[in-house]
């Protein structure tokens, strides 16, 4: 966190005021006029909104060990998923952020309850790489806020499970240990999403775990950096490697529009993932790369800074948006801006504040339409799944971004506890 504390102390309040006086563009498929002045934006009001929405959701969850995942467009009903679903950690993680903000122990109780449902995953062979999402968004936040040693043990055991998917011939963690279309199974596949699971490994290594956790995470990030990106720093969703000799076979998409397109959420995973790698390793190559993958994303955004689900979607400007990608990116850029500093860092934070303000508008908040925080996210467009929907990971990264912005506004490190 080189110079980050001093940077935000000097600049954060002024930057917030500067950024709030600029209006945000509207989704290009809408006709209503976006207000040019956002000086009424109130972070606490948005976090209070999240508390109220989460209260509604808690009252709706039908049984233990089920987690709210998606509300389809036009519906008010959550689709619930079991512990094994890759998104199961986002709801308890969201509850932890609400506890951090409110200091109300009812949110601690709820966060602990829904986190503990995930405990069996720490001792099971992993279904795929997503154990990092599941266990670190939940127990990672829980340990950060409580210091509960049971949580730490579960994180350590989860890291042990995750590295069983590592292939030293390739240098990356296998993402999907099963037959998925176009993945040439049983060859080795790695998806961009996997960058998000490296934080659990690096944290475990830094907190008394096996040094192999760090080695696996660094190798994975480096091999991904070498093979997952085109010359313009846009990313493939998936790279297929020969599992025996480690050679790259091909780069493809699974959830994006085309193999040569920039899938919005995939690029956001890269922005967040390499920013995190710099934080956890202090290696300058990750700081440089995080900027490169951020800059191409930012250069192609529509006027309101909320991306279409894929930057090459053929029906732009009428293509569905992906508020989840915007939330992931916003949270990451608040951190990256502090590391970069100077005018470029100020620009990152300025743009991020505009993203958060737009996500907090009536155009993107769910409000009375359902009990999620946000609408207009896209999960798996090629499969016709979760299109223009409310999705739990959009809510998770949105509330994370709000909590981070609140800390920044108050002159604190975004990584501190408030």
Image (cartoon, helix red, strand yellow):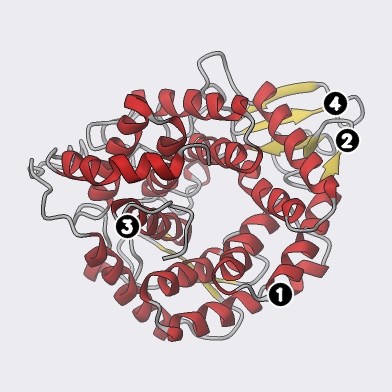
Q: Residues within 10 Å of mark 2 (few under 14, many from 20)?
A: some
Which of labels 1 and 2 is toward the front? 1
- Please give the name of the residue rendered at 33% of the width and 52% of the height, measured from the top-left corner: 411
On the rendered structure, is 206 left or right of 390?
right
Q: Sequence-wise, which precedes: disc 4 or disc 2? A: 2
Q: Secondary structure at mark 1?
A: helix
Q: Is residue 235 above or below residue 383?
A: above
The disc placed on residue 246 is: 4
Q: CA distance from mark 3 to mark 4?
A: 44 Å
Q: Position of residue 398 (x, y in %)?
A: 38, 55
Which of labels 4 and 2 is toward the front? 2
On the rendered structure, is 160 left or right of 371?
right
Q: Which residue is mark 3?
A: 406
Q: Position of residue 309 (x, y in %)?
A: 40, 39
Q: Sequence-wise, which precedes: disc 4 or disc 1? A: 1
Q: CA distance from mark 4 to mark 1?
A: 38 Å
Q: CA distance from mark 2 to mark 3?
A: 42 Å
Q: Is residue 192 visible?
A: yes
Q: CA distance from mark 1 to mark 3?
A: 28 Å
Q: Sequence-wise, which precedes: disc 1 or disc 3? A: 1
| Quadrant where the C terminus is found in the figure | bottom left
Q: Secondary structure at mark 3?
A: helix
The residue lying toward the viewer, choosing from 131 and 313, is: 131
On the rendered structure, is 254 left or right of 405?
right
Q: Quadrant of residue 10?
A: top left
Q: Which residue is mark 2?
A: 168
Residue lying furthest right in this view? Answer: 244
Dot 4 and dot 2 residues touching (CB under 8 Å): no
């Amino acid at each position: 966190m080189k110079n980050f504390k001093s940077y935000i102390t000097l600049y954060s309040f002024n930057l917030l005021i500067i950024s709030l006086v600029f209006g945000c563009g509207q989704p290009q498929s809408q006709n209503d006029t976006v207000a040019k002045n956002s000086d009424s934006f109130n972070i606490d009001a948005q976090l209070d909104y999240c508390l109220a929405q989460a209260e509604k959701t808690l009252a709706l969850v039908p049984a233990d060990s089920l987690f709210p995942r998606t509300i389809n467009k036009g519906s008010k009903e959550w689709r619930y998923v079991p512990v094994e679903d890759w998104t199961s950690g986002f709801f308890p993680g969201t509850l932890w952020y609400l506890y951090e903000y409110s200091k109300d122990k009812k949110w601690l109780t709820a966060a602990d309850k829904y986190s503990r449902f995930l405990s069996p995953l720490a001792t099971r062979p992993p279904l795929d790489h997503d154990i990092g999402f599941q266990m670190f968004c939940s127990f990672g936040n829980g340990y950060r806020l409580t210091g509960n040693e049971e949580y730490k043990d579960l994180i350590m055991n989860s890291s042990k499970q995750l590295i069983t998917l590592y292939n030293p011939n390739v240098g990356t963690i296998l993402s999907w240990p099963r037959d998925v279309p176009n993945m040439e199974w049983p060859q080795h596949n790695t998806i961009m999403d996997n960058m998000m699971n490296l934080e659990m490994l690096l944290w475990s290594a830094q907190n008394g775990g096996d040094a192999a956790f760090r080695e696996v995470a660094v190798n994975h990030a480096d091999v991904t950096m070498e093979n997952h990106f085109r010359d313009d720093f846009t990313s493939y969703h998936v790279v297929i490697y020969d599992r025996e000799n480690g050679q790259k076979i091909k780069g493809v998409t699974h959830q994006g529009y085309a193999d040569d397109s920039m899938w919005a959420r995939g690029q956001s995973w890269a922005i967040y993932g390499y920013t995190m790698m710099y934080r956890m390793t202090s290696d300058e190559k990750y700081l440089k790369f995080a900027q490169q993958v951020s800059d191409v994303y930012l250069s192609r955004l529509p006027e309101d800074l909320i991306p279409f689900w894929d930057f090459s979607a053929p029906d732009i400007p009428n293509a569905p948006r992906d508020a989840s990608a915007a939330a992931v990116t916003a949270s990451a850029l608040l951190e990256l801006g502090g590391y970069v500093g100077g005018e470029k860092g100020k620009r990152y934070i300025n743009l991020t504040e505009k993203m958060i303000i737009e996500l907090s508008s009536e155009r993107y908040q769910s409000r009375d339409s359902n009990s999620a925080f946000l609408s207009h996210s896209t999960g798996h467009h090629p499969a016709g799944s979760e299109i223009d929907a409310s999705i739990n990971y959009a809510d998770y990264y949105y509330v994370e971004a709000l909590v981070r912005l609140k800390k920044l506004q108050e002159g604190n490190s975004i990584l501190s506890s408030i």
